[in-house]
Amino acid sequence: MILIFFSILSNRWGANIGSLQISAVQNIPNGQEQILLWERNETQAREWRKGHINLRDIPYEFAVKIDGFVGNGFEGDVC
């Protein structure tokens, strides 16, 4: 069996954290289809956390899209 994973290290800290999203995007005849694979939207301790997404079961060619959204203020960092 072949395992295909997308791994991410993230650090989210502060009072006004937005969200971090990872999606699979596929071209379809009338545009694009986007499937949300992973999302985090809370602050965390001041440490790096790992995330793993199993890509093996996605049955089509796709691109990985990473979106970061700001929160409601300036007190927050996502990396």
Image (spheres, rainbow, N blue to C red):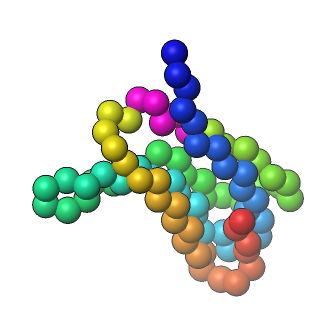
Above or below 47: residue 70: below
Q: Nearer the viewer, residue 74 or 20?
A: 20
Q: Nearer the viewer, residue 56 or 70?
A: 56
Q: Nearer the viewer, residue 48 or 3?
A: 3
Q: Residue furthest right?
A: 46
Count numbered badges in the picture.
0
What span is colored magenta in the figure?
53-57
**Residue 4 falls in which quadrant of the image?**
top right
Q: Is residue 71 left or right of residue 64?
A: right
Q: Residue furthest top?
A: 1
Q: Residue at x 72, y 65 (%)?
A: 79
**Picture coordinates of residue 65 (x, y %)?**
47, 59
Q: Residue furthest bottom?
A: 74
**Picture coordinates of residue 47 (x, y %)?**
85, 54
Q: Is residue 5 visible?
A: yes
Q: Residue at x 13, y 56 (%)?
A: 29
Above or below 69: residue 55: above
**Residue 53 falls in which quadrant of the image?**
top right
**Picture coordinates of residue 46 (x, y %)?**
86, 59
Q: Is residue 15 visible?
A: no
Q: Residue at x 52, y 22 (%)?
A: 2
Above or below 65: residue 62: above
Does residue 37 belong to the magenta stretch? no
**Residue 78 falls in which quadrant of the image?**
bottom right
Q: Main secondary structure of the magenta part?
A: loop
Q: Is residue 78 left or right of residue 31?
A: right
Q: Residue at x 37, y 48 (%)?
A: 62
**Picture coordinates of residue 26 (x, y %)?**
30, 51
Q: Is residue 52 left or right of residue 37?
A: right
